[in-house]
Amino acid sequence: MKARVVKSTGNWYLIQPQTGDLLKARIRGKFRLDNIQHTNPVAVGDHVEYETDKDGLALITKIEERKNYIIRRSVNLSKKTHIIASNIDRAFLIVTLENPRTSSGFIDRFLVTAEAYHIPVSIVINKMDLYDEKLLKEAEELSELYKHTGYEVIAVSAIRGDNIALLRSKLTNKVSLFSGHSGVGKSTLMNVFHPDLDTKTAEVSDFNKKGQHTTTFAEMHPWPFGGYCIDTPGIKEFGLAEMEPEEVGDYFPEIHRTKSDCKFHNCMHLNEPQCAVRKAVSKGEIAKSRYRNYLIFVEELSE
C-alpha cells in the first residue's frame, strides 16, 4: 500500500494513505540502517510503501525515488545530513529585515542548496507593515538584487494583506515548502491562508530579537484552495552539505551564466587572470554581497 509522509517526529511518522485516514507509522530497523548518511531516513513529503502488522500499526517498507529534496548539514552531527523535506514543487523562503533580521548569507545558503537539488525558490519579504522609510528602501534594494539574479521576490504583509492574493495564487495546487528563521512569520502567513489550521505563533523576543521556535517538526498541511504546504521548524543556521567547492559557482545563477567567459575552464573566480566573474563584480553586474558569500562558501567547503 502507498502513502505520503505528512509529519516526522523522530522515531514516529504520520502517513496519509491514498484513501482513508492518517496512520501512525514506524520504519523497520533494517531499513533504518540502509540510510545512515542522513539523520532522518524518511522525510516529510516522501512517497512510501507500507504494510500493517497484527496490531494495526503501519510499517514503512520502502521509500519511492524522490524527485528532489532540500538538505542541510546536521547541527549536532557534523558528518551527517538532515533532509528537511522532499518532493517539493516550490520553496518559499520567508525573510524579514528586523525582528529577526535575515542575513544575506542565510538567504544565499538556502538558495544555493535549493539550486543544487533543482527546487525553484520564491523569496517572500514579510512584515512590510512594520518597516520605516529606511527599511522599506532596504527591502526594495533586496528585491531588485534577487530579481536581477533571476529569483521571484514577493513583498507581503500578513497583517495588512499586501500581496496575499498573489502569494495564494503561487501556492494553489502545489506542494510548497515554507522556510526561514523563527519569528519571520511563517505560522502567521499559514494561518491567513488556512484559519482552521491555528498554527502556533510566538512573539519575537525583545531581548535578542530572535524568534521563538513554534514548529518542532516538519509537517505537511493541505490548503483549502488545493495543494499542500510543508511547514518547517525555524532554522538558525543552514550548513551546506553534499557539495564540492568546485560546484558552488554553478548554484549561483549569475556566476554560472558568466563563467564561460573566463580564460580558464576550471576558473574558481578567486585570483585567476582574466576571470569574467570578478570583472562582472567590479562592474556591478554581479552583486558584491553575492560574490562575497560565494567566497565564504568555497572556503567553508574546502575545509
Image (cartoon, grey):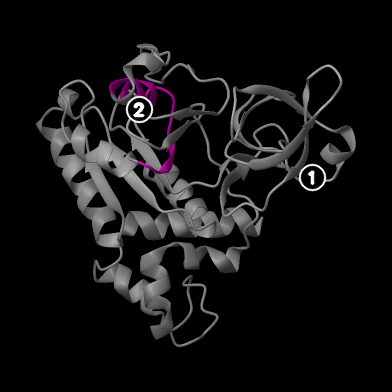
Q: Residue flagged by tag 2: what amino acid is it?
A: Pro
Q: Position of residue 296 (x, y in %)?
A: 50, 54
- The secondary element bearing badge 2 is classed as loop
> Foreground: 125 or 294?
125
Q: Residue at x 82, y 37 (%)?
A: 32
Q: Position of residue 153 (x, y in %)?
A: 26, 47
Q: Position of residue 240 (x, y in %)?
A: 58, 49
Furthest-front residue in view? 19
Q: Residue flagged by tag 1: what amino acid is it?
A: Asn
Q: Is residue 174 left or right of residue 32?
A: left
Q: Quadrant of the C terminus?
A: bottom right
Residue neighbourhood size for the residue with mark 2, other residues' Cα within 10 Å, grouped as few (<14), some (14–19), many (≥20): few
Q: Is residue 114 above or below residue 20?
A: below
Furthest-left residue in view? 133
Find disc 2 in the rendering and name its residue.
224
Q: Position of residue 223 (x, y in %)?
A: 38, 30
Find disc 1 in the rendering and name its residue.
35
Q: Is residue 91 left or right of residue 247?
A: left
Residue range in magenta is 173-192
Furthest-bottom residue in view? 263
Q: Earlier in the sequence, mark 1 or mark 2?
A: 1
Q: Quadrant of the N terminus?
A: top right
Q: Is residue 32 above or below residue 222?
A: below
Residue 215 visible in the picture: yes
Check if residue 187 falls in the magenta segment: yes
